Amino acid sequence: QVQLQESGPGLVKPSQTLSLTCTVSGGSISSGSYYWSWIRQPAGKGLEWIGRIYTSGSTNYNPSLKSRVTISVDTSKNQFSLKLSSVTAADTAVYYCARGCIAADIYYFDYWGQGTLVTVSS
Amino acid sequence: SYVLTQPPSVSVAPGKTARITCGGNNIGSKSVHWYQQKPGQAPVLVIYYDSDRPSGIPERFSGSNSGNTATLTISRVEAGDEADYYCQVWDSSSDPTGVVFGGGTKLTVL
């Protein structure tokens, strides 16, 4: 059973960089046709996809966040990470990591982390 | 960019059938996936590839997709089905490509 766990600071100051790590257990991050994604959800609002990475390092980002986002992968640690720069209060949200299954033009999330709340405040 | 439109809320009595729609331009040409999210929990995949159910999801959950509307149908609704439901597609028709979520529908069991 694959499990994902987010970790990182729960409080980030405005203009600083938000950094989160997702640790994958129960399977290798390098096995299979999976892209690993970050998704966020502000309180009381819907889901917003941030971006994804393949273990080759290939990435895709949400155009609305692309200028501030970097997603990386460390296969030796079975982890992938998110960095979001120049944060504001609008970046306050629960951040989820998820495993994405891919086939041609199809992509969906079959495993999710429990989510971690990140608050942007001075 | 591609837009998915869901009704903000749907209400249904226990034992009845709930239908949650997800509208998008020619969505029938895409593969639609559905997630259930209960308060304080991470989303759970309930339907993928328009109508397939992951292991462990009750047969009461089904999906369809045609034209400009995809539909999640929950038969014999139970109190435990009360949750937010999100549809999702991979948009390869726009540049750049990316994941698109609907705005979510809150299912209330009366």
Image (cartoon, helix red, strand yellow):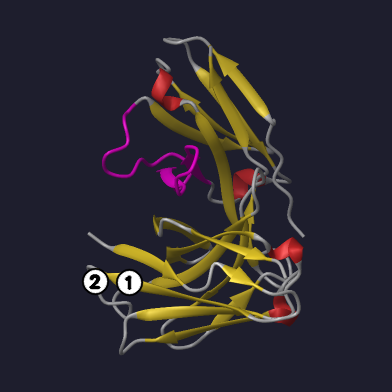
In the image: residue B29, left or right of residue B18: right
* Residue drawn where x is 50% and y is 43% of the image: B34
Q: Is residue A36 visible?
A: yes
Q: Mark 2 — on which chain does it sit?
A: A
Q: Which mark is residue A27?
A: 2
Residue in front for this viewpoint, A72 or B62: A72
Q: Check disc 2 and give the amino acid type.
A: Gly
* Residue drawn where x is 65% and y is 45% of the image: B102
Magenta stretch bounds: B33-59
On screen, residue B8 above or below A15: above
Q: Check disc 1 and give the amino acid type.
A: Val
Quadrant where the C terminus of chain A sits is: bottom right
On screen, residue B87 above or below A36: above
Q: Is residue B91 visible?
A: no
Q: Which residue is mark 1?
A: A24
Residue in front for this viewpoint, A36 or A4: A4
